[in-house]
Amino acid sequence: MSQAIMPGTLDLLILKAVSLGQQHGYGVLLRIEQLSNGAWAIEQGALYPALYRLETKGWIKSEWGTSDNNRRAKFYELTAAGRKQLRLESENWRRTVALMDLALGTESA
């Protein structure tokens, strides 16, 4: 069963997926599904605007190439700025999770 991703986490997931190696857009979708053991299925209508946004910010770059099924596709890879952003967003996410665990673990009086 697919689970909705939390608002604001799509960029982080894309950065992580692309950090594992150059990938075309549909491959990024598949990689996110793989990373989440199938729990997250990203819609193409959300992915491609996000890829464009990340490229505009300079966090990823793209070049045209040929996919495994011999189709023309844009391949994305992480830039140095993207690696830095991935580190920052990963640290922020881990801090948020730790704080939520702390808050949710607090017993009522």
Image (cartoon, helix red, strand yellow):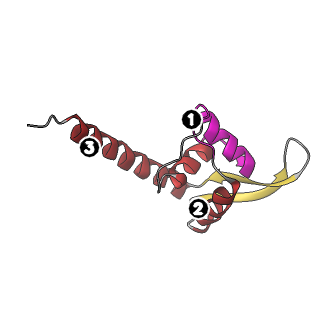
Horizontally, residue 108 falls left or right of residue 89, namely left
Could you tell me which secondary element the residue under label 2 belongs to?
Answer: helix
Percent x, y for residue 80?
A: 54, 54
Q: Mark 1 or mark 2: which comes first in sequence?
A: 1
Residue type at numbered disc 1: Ser
Horizontally, residue 97 falls left or right of residue 57, namely left
Q: Give the Cα separation between the discs numbered 3 and 2.
A: 27 Å
Which quadrant is home to the C terminus?
Answer: top left
Query: What residue lies at 74% left-to-right and 48% top-to-bottom?
Result: 26
Task: Identify residue for label 3.
Answer: 99
Percent x, y for residue 45?
A: 68, 59
The span shown in magenta is 20-41
Q: Mark 3 or mark 2: which comes first in sequence?
A: 2
Mark 2 Cα shell of 10 Å, populated few (<14), some (14-19), many (≥20): some
Task: Identify residue for label 1.
Answer: 36
Query: What residue lies at 54% left-to-right and 41% top-to-bottom?
Result: 3
Task: Identify residue for label 2.
Answer: 54
Residue type at numbered disc 3: Leu
Percent x, y for residue 7?
A: 47, 55
